[in-house]
Amino acid sequence: MTVIVTGGSRGIGRSVVERLCADGVAVLFTHSASDDEAREVEDRLGPLARGVRLDVTAQDAPGRLFDLAESSGEVTGLVNNAGVTGRLGPIVGLSDDDLRRVVEVNLIGPIRLCREAARRWKGRNGKSIVTVSSVAARTGSPGEYVAYAATKAAVETMTVGLAKELAPGVRVNAVSPGTIDTTIHARAGEPGRAWRVAERIPLARPGKPAEIAEAVTWLLSGHASYITGAILDVSGGL
C-alpha cells in the first residue's frame, strides 16, 4: 500500500514520512523546491520513500500525484500537510500575492486533493485522509497569522463535512498541532518564535514534529478505525 504525503521533505511532513516508512508503508511525498532535502529523505529511508517536486496548487497536481502513487500500488491514504504561513505580522502588512498563496496552498490544494481521492476511492473501503490543521484555527493568531488561521479553520470544516459525505468507505480526520519547533517560523521571519511563545503552553515547550507524526499515522491506521470527522488536538494543552 502507498500513502501520499504533501510537503514531506521537512518539518512535520518529513516526520510523517519517516514514521510511515518505519512501519513498512510506502510513501510518495511532495516538495515544492527542496530538492536536496527530499533526496536526503529518499537516500536515508530507501525504496519505501519516493519524492516528487510538485506545486500542490498546479492545475494538474491532483491527477498527476495520484497517478504517480498508484504506479507503486494501491493508495490507501492521503496526508494534506503542505502549508505556508506568509510573513509574520499584522494583516495590514499582508500583500495580495501572499494572501492568494496562503489560501491556494492551505485550502484550495487540500480540497482539490480530497476531491481527487473521493473520485478514485468511490465504492472502496479502508481509505483514510488526514489533514494537518493548526491551533491557530481556534486562537485566530492575531497580529501574526490571521489569514493562515482562517485557512486552517476552513480545512477543519472541510474535514467534518467530508467525513460525513465519504463515510463509510473513507475516514476523514485532522490533526491540530500547537506551536511546533520547525523551520516554518524562520521562513515566516522569526526563527525563535517557537520558544518565544512556549511560555503560554501548559507543557512549557514547543512540540516536536515527531509528536505530530505519531498522531497523523495513528489516525491513518486501523487502530483509529472508528474515528472519522475528528480534529485531534496535539498542542501541549494550549
Image (cartoon, helix red, strand yellow):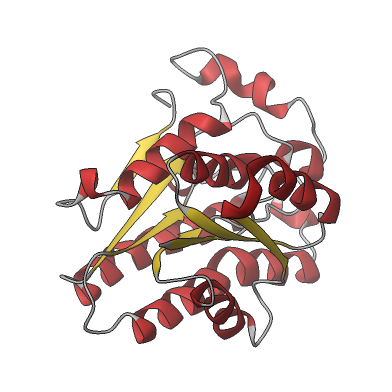
Nearest the eye: 177 or 35: 35
In the picture, measured across the screen, residue 145 lies left or right of residue 37, that is: left
Nearest the eye: 54 or 238: 54
In the picture, measured across the screen, residue 75 lies left or right of residue 13, that is: left
Query: Which residue is depicted at the point 45% across and 46% down?
Result: 24
How many numbered discs? 0
Nearest the eye: 177 or 44: 44
Query: Which residue is depicted at the point 70% across and 54% down?
Result: 91
Position of residue 58 relative to residue 199, above or below, is below
Query: Which residue is depicted at the point 71% across and 68% down?
Result: 101
In the picture, measured across the screen, residue 14 lies left or right of residue 234, that is: right
Res. 80 visible in picture: yes
Location of the C terminus (image quadrant): top left
Nearest the eye: 31 or 104: 31
Location of the N terminus (image quadrant): bottom left
Q: Position of residue 68 (x, y in %)?
A: 59, 76
Q: Position of residue 148 (x, y in %)?
A: 60, 55
